[in-house]
Image (cartoon, rainbow, N blue to C red):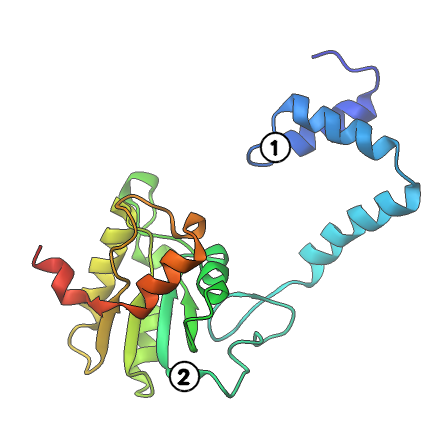
C-alpha cells in the first residue's frame, strides 16, 4: 500500500497493530480523523495517554481501577466471603452485567497454557491462595471459559485449594464447551452463575 504521506503511513501502521484492524480499516479511520476538529483529535489522543499514565490495578482483586482499590472491592455491601475467579477484566464485566453476583472478584490475568508458555507463576494464583488462607473466604466460584486452557486452570486451582475448608463451585455448563465467557449473553451467564455446582461434580464426568 502506497501512502501520500509518511505521517499517514505511521498513523496507519500504529492503528493496524491493534487486534481486528487491518490496514484498509486503519486508513479509513486515519482519513476520518483528518476531517475532524484538531481539538477533538487531541482529546482522543490524550485519553489514551491519560489511560496509560494513570490507570491502576486494584490491590485486592487485580482488576483495572482508577483508585488503588476498585469500586467493587471498596463496596461494603458486597459479600466478601464469596470470590468469583475470572480470567480478565472483560469476563469480570460480563459477570457483573448479569446483576446475579454480589460477591467480589479475583482477576487471574490469564489462563494456564503450556503451549503458550504460560504457567501458574505467570498469573495471580498464589495471590488467590493467600487470600483464601486468610480465613474470611467461604466459597470460590470458578468462572473461566470452557476451553482447554480454562479447564486446565480450573483443575490446577482446585488442587491448590481443595484441602482448605471452603466451598469450591464452578459455573453451570449451560454454556457450550469451548465458549469464551466474555461473548456469552447476560441471561445465559447469569443463569450459569446462579446455578453453579460443586466443582467436584465436573471431575466425575
Residue 123: percent from left, percent from top: 38, 58
Quadrant in the rendering for residue 125: bottom left
Q: Position of residue 163 (x, y in %)?
A: 15, 76
Q: Nearer the viewer, residue 194 or 56?
A: 194
Is there any visible trace of residue 123 in the rendered image? no
User: Disc number at residue 203?
Assistant: none
Which quarter of the rendering shows the C terminus? Answer: bottom left
**Between marks 2 and 1 in the image, the one whose residue lies nearer the viewer:** 2
Q: How far apart, in angstroms, are the residues tagged by discs 2 and 1? A: 40 Å
Q: Residue at x 44, y 51 (%)?
A: 182
Mark 1 nearby-residue class (10 Å; few <14, some 14–19, many ≥20) = few
Q: Residue furthest left?
A: 204
Q: Which comes before the other along the chain, label 2 or label 1?
A: 1
| Helix, strand or loop under label 2 | strand
| Horizontal and vertical percent position of residue 40 | 87, 46
Q: Is residue 47 visible?
A: yes
Which residue is located at x 24 percent, y 69 percent?
169
**Vertical placement of residue 40 versus 140, above or below:** above
Identify the residue position indicated by label 2 in the image.
Answer: 80
How packed mark 2 is, by other alpha carbons closer than 10 Å (few <14, some 14-19, many 20 or more), is some
Mark identifier at residue 17:
1
Amino acid at each position: 500500500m502506497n501512502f501520500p504521506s509518511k505521517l499517514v503511513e505511521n498513523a496507519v501502521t500504529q492503528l493496524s497493530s491493534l487486534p481486528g484492524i487491518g490496514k484498509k480499516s486503519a486508513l479509513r479511520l486515519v482519513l476520518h480523523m483528518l476531517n475532524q476538529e484538531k481539538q477533538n483529535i487531541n482529546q482522543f489522543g490524550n485519553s489514551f495517554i491519560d489511560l496509560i499514565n494513570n490507570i491502576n490495578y486494584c490491590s485486592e482483586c487485580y482488576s483495572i481501577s482508577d483508585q488503588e482499590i476498585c469500586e467493587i472491592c471498596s463496596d461494603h455491601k458486597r459479600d466478601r466471603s464469596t470470590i468469583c475467579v475470572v480470567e480478565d477484566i472483560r469476563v469480570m464485566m460480563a459477570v457483573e452485567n448479569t446483576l446475579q453476583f454480589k460477591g467480589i472478584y479475583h482477576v487471574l490475568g490469564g489462563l494456564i497454557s503450556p503451549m503458550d508458555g504460560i504457567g501458574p507463576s505467570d498469573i495471580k494464583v498464589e495471590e488467590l491462595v493467600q487470600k483464601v488462607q486468610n480465613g474470611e473466604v467461604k466459597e470460590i466460584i470458578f468462572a473461566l471459559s470452557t476451553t482447554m486452557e480454562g479447564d486446565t486452570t480450573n483443575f490446577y486451582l482446585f488442587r491448590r485449594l481443595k484441602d482448605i475448608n471452603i466451598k469450591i463451585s464452578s459455573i453451570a455448563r449451560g454454556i457450550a464447551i469451548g465458549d469464551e465467557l466474555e461473548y456469552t449473553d447476560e441471561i445465559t451467564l447469569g443463569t450459569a452463575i446462579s446455578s453453579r455446582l460443586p466443582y467436584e461434580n465436573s471431575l466425575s464426568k
